[in-house]
Image (cartoon, rainbow, N blue to C red):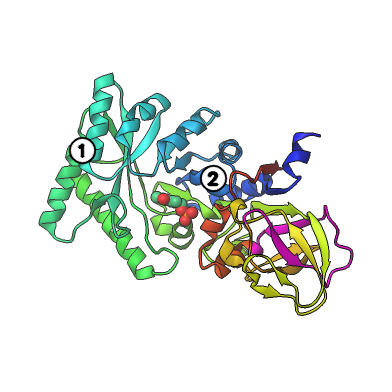
Amino acid sequence: MDDLQIATSRTWAEINLANLEHNFKILKSLLNPGAKFLAVCKADAYGHGVIACAKKLQACGADWIAVASVVEGVELRENGITLPILCLGQANPELASLMCEHEITQAVGDFENGKALSDYARLVGKKIKIHVKIDTGMSRTGFYWPESDSDKASTAAEIKNLCELPGLEAEGLFTHFAAADEDENFTRLQLKKFLDAKNTLAALGLAFKISHAAASVGVLNYPEAHLDIGRFGLVLYGYASTDTGNEGSTLGLKPVMKVKSKITAVRKLPTGTTISYGRTFTLKRDSVIAVLPIGYADGLPRVLSNEFSVKIHNSLCPILGRICMDMCMADVTDLEGVKPGDVATIFDEDLIPLAAKNSGTIIHEIVCSPSPRVPRVFIE
Ligand SMILES: *Cc1c(COP(=O)(O)O)cnc(C)c1O
């Protein structure tokens, strides 16, 4: 039995690297000329398998890779990623040695944090590259950019002190939008604040080589926010909005992930039979159900019990009853000839947005949900 047979024996995520490349090319063509392409590969490349995806993106010509933690960056370095890597998460001074050793550029959002990195870098005689984060309205990390001129002056002075610390090389300045997909006024206000911060710092003699602001939807909707780098996350994986797949297909983006399961049993059960834990579904007719080897421990959210359908022989088949840890049941009564070993599609470009909608979340969370038990199978 070969590895592929084993990987596809139960439930797996099929990752189409040709689609990733296709999306990269489309998105690259939408960037202002001169702006660099940063591929966001945090969280195992949004659940797609980070090593293969980052290698593909590096081969395609991406300029930067971003991760959420230094440990994610180290994994990329150990697997042949030579592009600049930006760690977007708050700097963890405990990991300063790894930043130095693996040349990971670190986001810094407050003075104390940057000071701790500086102390380490100075001690070992190295430099850590940093991108200074400005909080323009996300209220997560970053220097809060205030309203009054006197407050601006003191924040700017603090940032200047940070950037002049020994052992640090302040390369970039950036911010992050809180509502690029839903609030145009607020997004424009954030961009205005960011440019104000940039200009205020420039007036103090602090010119950053690189500034950036926009993630996926920001790049698509606000060309004036491209600046020096566009940070592409969800769009790379084929979805142009957090809740529907439609905008992505208008741009010609192709979904990169499909999750598939091999039907383990097909059973005839009579009217009145209840299905699964808690008996939340009662058969209203003599039925045929397919048992699927995927459950919430594989990343099929349990809240989708009785609220989701999968595709079998290209038809939508409702999930009946509660989703268990390792299995769930689908109604195949109306389909001819379904048999054990047939492949069901659990997530694809239609079902991922449906799962997001019916579980009250966003597409980001659904693509991140397949667990480590689900092998990623890469196709070109
Ligand atoms: C996650 C993240 C991104 C990517 O967001 P998408 O909406 O998936 O494009 C970009 N920038 C920062 C700072 C992030 O944390």
**Does the magenta-highlighted stretch encompass residue 321?**
no
Q: Nearer the viewer, residue 128 or 37?
A: 128
Measuring from the top left, give residue 316's x and y in whole percent: 74, 69
Q: Nearer the viewer, residue 80 or 373?
A: 373
> Residue sitting at 65 percent across and 63 percent down?
351
Q: Residue furthest right?
A: 337
Magenta range: 325-351
Measuring from the top left, give residue 261's x and y in whole percent: 73, 53
* Number of the front mark, 1 or 2: 2
Task: Decide: is 203 above or below 123.
Answer: below
**Does the magenta-highlighted stretch encompass residue 334?**
yes
> Residue sitting at 22 percent across and 45 percent down?
202
Callout 1 amino acid = Leu
Q: Could you tell me which quadrant the N terminus lies in?
A: top right
Task: Decide: is 104 above or below 374.
Answer: above
**The label number, if any, that marks residue 162 in the structure image:** 1
Measuring from the top left, give residue 135's x and y in whole percent: 28, 54
Task: Decide: is 349 above or below 40.
Answer: below
From the viewer's perspective, is 119 left or right of 4?
A: left
Residue identified by numbered label 2? 45
